[in-house]
Image: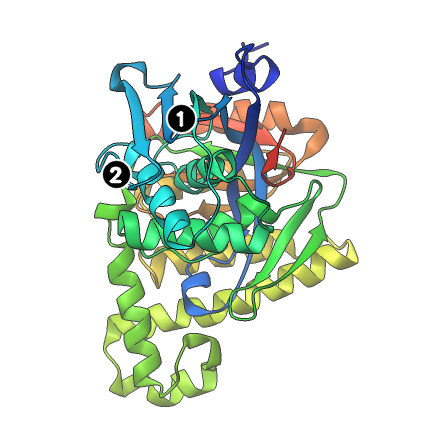
Amino acid sequence: MTDPSPAQQLLASPPPDSDVLVRAPGRANLIGEYTDVNEGWVLPVALELATVVAGRAGGGLLRLRSLDLPDEGTVEIDLATGRGPSSGWGRYATAVVEVLRDQGRALRGIDGVLASDVPLGAGLSSSAALEVAVALAVLDEPVDPLALAQLCQRAENEGVGVQSGLMDQLASTGSQAGAALLLDCRELTTEHVPLPPGLGVLVVDSAVSRDLSSSAYNERRQQCEQAAADLGVGSLRDATLDALEDRWSSMDEVVRRRARHVLTENARVLDMARALRSGDAAPLGALLAASHESLARDFEVSTPELDQLVEAALATPGVVGSRMTGAGFGGCTVSLVEVDRAQEVREEVLRRYAQASGRAPRGWVSTAADGASVV
């Protein structure tokens, strides 16, 4: 049995003088990649992996020391001015404080520690978990899950410079144990769609790390905006495959493939939600496979290692379906697996992938977890 992570230890046994304890989970998106920034639909689950903040409330400073990165020292942010670090993990905390100040939210100082078992650069929204945990810790007033997610999204967009959609933050704030979160990214409505009791979630890190702010994420978003303009709609949410086919020869070859991914991916999200509601697991594998193929070929955000990892999962008994998850360019895959064989499946997928790639992967079995909370 593995030892508990620093985050698990902190959650179970915070410093004795702590009067603030919060947790915010990472997420794995089951299906619906790059649809959120095109006002479409996504279907993430919150994971048991989480960021935890514990400390003593009081004063006018947010002071946090990372148990995972002790050499980076203590991050300190002045709540009155919003001044804080502009690099490292502290820049996310600074961005959150700045947005909360701009919104006139009531804030409280915190002197404490932070730990996270959401892996960095793996596509499991470690940044969103950090933002949500910091916001929950420093807020001195209640905020509903949607508003909290929007505040943290704004921090990432404006303070960090990554033009992410709302999915990551809302999956962290608004999820429910045992269910995936179907989010309509235009209407901002959500539905908790139960996962079949016999299915668990396996996330495997390909050991190919990426920095989203320096990736081609923003370029992909711009290409989608160009596709919408070419099709005469405000967003690809309003486009159809028939319209895309009609304009196919007059559009840039790359831009039209980006559009095809988004349109077909939206349909896959809704098809998967329907299958889960009905308890029918039969279509799930094909939907996940089609999503991965579209991300690899039309959206070009997979890597050879992610492809190898999906192949390793699909060759393992007990795996229902598998695909890359997150923004790509490295990171993780997500697989639906038979829950009573999940640990066995995890070990076999890791073995197969390590043998094929020469890399040292990590894997986590999780249930669909609750969203962020003040403990």
Residue that label 1 marks: 361
Q: Write down the quadrant of residue 273 in the picture.
A: bottom right
Dot 2: within a 10 Å radius of its alpha carbon, few (fewer than 14), some, or many (20 or more) residues? Answer: some
Query: Quadrant of the image for the N terminus?
Result: top right
Q: Write down the quadrant of residue 75 in the picture.
A: top left
Q: Nearer the viewer, mark 2 or mark 1?
A: 2
**Identity of the amino acid at label 1?**
Pro
In the picture shown, does residue 19 fall above or below 122?
A: above
Residue at (33% x, 46% y) in the render: 98
Residue that label 2 marks: 83
Question: Residue 88, percent across and down?
Answer: 25, 32
Q: Nearer the viewer, residue 244 or 209?
A: 209
Q: Write down the quadrant of residue 357 in the picture.
A: top left
Q: Which mark is residue 283?
A: none
Dot 1: within a 10 Å radius of its alpha carbon, few (fewer than 14), some, or many (20 or more) residues? Answer: some
Q: Earlier in the sequence, mark 2 or mark 1?
A: 2
In the picture shown, does residue 25 fall above or below 191?
A: above
- Display colour scheme: rainbow
| Residue 186 visible, this angle | yes
Q: Nearer the viewer, residue 280 or 91?
A: 91
Question: Residue 365, percent across and down?
Answer: 58, 29
Question: Residue 27, percent across and down?
Answer: 52, 42
Query: Quadrant of the image for the C terminus?
Result: top right
Residue at (42% x, 40% y) in the render: 131
Residue at (38% x, 18% y) in the render: 68
Q: CA distance from mark 2 to mark 1?
A: 38 Å
Q: How many numbered discs sit on the rendered protein?
A: 2
Q: Nearer the viewer, residue 185 or 363?
A: 185
| Residue 89 visible, this angle | no
Callout 1 secondary element? loop
Residue at (36% x, 32% y) in the render: 120
